[in-house]
Image (spheres, helix red, strand yellow):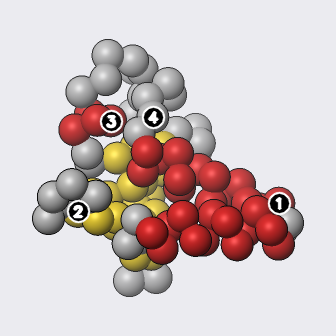
Amino acid sequence: MARHTWTSLFTVRSSSSDSTYEVKRDPKTGAYGCSCKGWKFQKKSMFERECKHTRVAREAIEALESKEEKRMKAALSALERMGARDSVAA
């Protein structure tokens, strides 16, 4: 099994509790991961797992890479609603 080298992207607030979760990405494989239970306990490979936190992070990264202003604004707005904090710059 391939070993992942995770890079932390964001810390997000839970919408239902006081918890915070860390969203990470493996730069070699492009796989996203999250510390939330919804991601951790899925019975899928790491490449197939997804949760609302990784979905928003993936959409934000793709929007920023596309440089399409409308997509970028929507993605950043979604991250703000989740209370995302940039872990890379922190």
Q: Nearer the viewer, residue 75 or 85?
A: 75
Identify the image quadrant of the C terminus.
bottom left
Asked if disc 4 and disc 3 are in contact, CB closer than 8 Å, the reply is: yes
Q: How many marks?
A: 4
Residue 66, which numbered label?
1
Q: Is residue 14 above or below residue 42?
A: below
Amino acid on which the number 3 mark rests in the picture? Trp
Q: Amino acid at mark 4?
A: Glu
Mark-to-mark CA distance, 3 and 2: 14 Å
How many residues crowd mark 4 within 10 Å: few (<14), some (14–19), many (20+)?
some
Residue 52 placement (x, y as % from top left): 43, 45
Inter-mark Cα distance, 2 to 4:
17 Å
Name the residue at 54% across, 64% down.
78
Name the residue at 82% across, 60% down: 66
**Residue occupying the point 26% across, 48% down:** 35
Q: Residue furthest bottom?
A: 90
Q: Are marks 2 and 4 in contact (CB under 8 Å)?
A: no
54, 45: nearer the viewer: 54
Q: How far is disc 4 from disc 3 in space, using C-alphas? A: 6 Å
Q: Earlier in the sequence, mark 3 or mark 2?
A: 2
Task: First in sequence, mark 4 or 3: give its number.
Answer: 3
Of label 2 and label 1, which has the lower sequence position?
A: 2
Dot 3 falls on a residue whose secondary structure is helix
Farthest residue, direction left: 18
Mark 1 vs 3, N-terminal side: 3
The residue singled out by tag 3 in the image is: 39
Residue with the mark numbered 2: 20
